[in-house]
Image (cartoon, grey):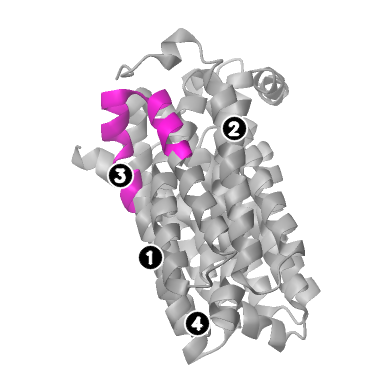
């Protein structure tokens, strides 16, 4: 991997991580945030759910914009909005105000979650794209691994409000790096003849593509397994098992490390076996492990067993998501921004709805969380088996071409 590719992966990873960082860094603060603002657990979790829903829906805005005006200007706008909204969150006097600024923060974060995927597709296809995507995810791993620990440190020194001040500083730093170092991968000559009208109309063709939609839903249910964990784990680990916020952060980081470490094998395995076979076997493994975990929780309430099986299951998820994301974009290079946006929207909305439904049954015990994770994993497997039967020959072949 050349130095320039590694540098690009680092930069794109940091831009993409801004949104997830805004989720992970304040997870340890959820119980104390609720007490500070006199809010119920349901309202506190709503600040997470709203973020996910807005990120899902508003990605549809940034994709066509980036296809028409280039990749960099929408990133600039998104990071500025995110930084200003983070300041609003830090100053919020009520939970309702916080939720409103979280929605605006999510709208800004959308740009960084859509456009880096389009940049990858601008430059590469096949397992080369999988290689860059995996490197990008490796850089992103700093968020779920270090962000909760950073959040715990900030909370211990000050309060949850300073967590959002940190997010504003992070956004400004990413904005400066984008202006100075990110190249424009969708230059003006490739945008000739494109208008916002035909860019947005590309969603119609994408929605009629069963393979694209199927793989997007697979990514959605796959991500939902992790989002159900994100939404429930702070209460389960801290209130049910009695962990401190720092201990919870370490446990959360362990699962994230498994996911991102395994994602680094995606390029090598897809080059050898092909993207489609890799997707098939990894989703079966995720579903099997998570189903076993959900079944055991009916008889055994063990933190060690739960953490061990989640570590294994999220490792296989690290193989599934990059491979499915790359394969979904493979035939849509001409509208990579719109395709990336629709993929992200389906992914985030599916995950957010799943997290919300599980939250309805949450009682701060492990059972609702683990059963919800298993149901999402099985749904991803069934959708995968349906979708892969419809792959055209050039996508089903293994190994893919570079």
Say if the magenta span includes residue 265.
Answer: yes
> Circle 4 sits on which residue?
245
Q: Dot 3 corresponds to which residue?
A: 264
**Nearer to the camera, 1 or 177:** 1
> Alpha carbon of mark 4 to alpha carbon of mark 3: how far?
29 Å
- Residue 69 lies, with reference to residue 30, above or below; the image says above
Image spot of residue 148 (x, y percent): 47, 72
Q: Earlier in the sequence, mark 1 or mark 2?
A: 1
Residue 52 can be seen, yes or no: yes
Asked whether residue 170 is drawn in magenta, I would say no
Q: CA distance from mark 1 to mark 2?
A: 28 Å
Q: Residue 95 at what x, y percent from top left?
A: 76, 76
Q: Which residues are magenta?
A: 261-284
Q: In the image, which is nearer the foreground, mark 1 or mark 2? A: 2
Q: Residue furthest bottom?
A: 157
Across and down, in percent, residue 304 comes to 42, 71
Determine the secondary structure under disc 4.
helix
Among numbered discs 4 and 1, the one appearing first in the sequence: 4
Mark 1 residue crowding within 10 angstroms, few (<14) / some (14–19) / many (20+): some
Mark number, residue 254: 1
Estimate how packed mark 3 is, as few (under 14), some (14 to 19) or many (20 or more) residues with alpha carbons within 10 Å.
many
């Amino acid at each position: 991997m050349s130095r320039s590719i590694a540098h690009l992966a680092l930069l794109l990873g940091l831009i993409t991580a801004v949104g997830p960082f805004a989720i992970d860094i304040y997870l340890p603060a959820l119980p104390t945030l609720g007490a500070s603002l006199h809010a119920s657990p349901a309202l506190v979790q709503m600040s997470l759910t709203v973020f996910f829903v807005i990120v899902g829906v508003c990605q549809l805005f940034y994709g066509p914009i980036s296809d028409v005006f280039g990749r960099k200007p929408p990133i600039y706008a998104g990071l500025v909005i995110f930084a200003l909204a983070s300041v609003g969150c830090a100053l919020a006097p009520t939970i309702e105000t916080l939720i409103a600024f979280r929605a605006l923060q999510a709208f800004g974060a959308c740009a960084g979650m859509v456009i880096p995927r389009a940049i990858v597709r601008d430059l590469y296809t096949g397992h080369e794209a999988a290689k860059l995507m995996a490197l990008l995810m490796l850089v992103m791993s700093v968020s779920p691994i270090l962000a909760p620990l950073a959040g715990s440190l900030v909370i211990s020194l000050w309060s949850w409000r300073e967590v959002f001040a940190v997010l504003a500083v992070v956004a400004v730093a990413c904005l400066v790096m984008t202006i100075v170092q990110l190249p424009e991968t969708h230059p003006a000559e490739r945008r000739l003849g494109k208008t916002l009208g035909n860019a947005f109309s590309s969603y119609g063709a994408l929605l009629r593509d069963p393979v694209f939609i199927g793989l997007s839903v697979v990514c959605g249910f796959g991500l939902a397994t992790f989002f159900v964990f994100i939404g429930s784990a702070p209460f389960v680990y801290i209130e049910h098992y009695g962990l401190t916020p720092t201990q919870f952060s370490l446990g959360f980081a362990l699962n994230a490390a498994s996911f991102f470490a395994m994602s680094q094998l995606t390029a090598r395995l897809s080059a050898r076996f092909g993207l489609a076979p890799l997707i098939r076997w990894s989703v079966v493994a995720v579903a099997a492990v998570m189903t076993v975990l959900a079944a055991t929780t009916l008889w055994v309430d063990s933190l060690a067993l739960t953490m061990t099986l989640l570590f294994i299951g999220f490792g296989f998820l690290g193989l599934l998501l990059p491979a499915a994301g790359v394969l979904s974009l493979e035939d849509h290079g001409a509208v990579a921004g719109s395709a990336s946006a629709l993929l992200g929207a389906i992914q985030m909305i599916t995950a957010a709805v799943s997290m919300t439904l599980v939250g309805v049954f949450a009682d701060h015990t492990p059972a609702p969380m683990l059963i919800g994770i298993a149901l999402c994993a099985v749904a991803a497997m069934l959708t995968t088996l349906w979708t892969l039967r419809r792959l055209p020959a050039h996508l089903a072949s293994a190994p893919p071409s570079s």
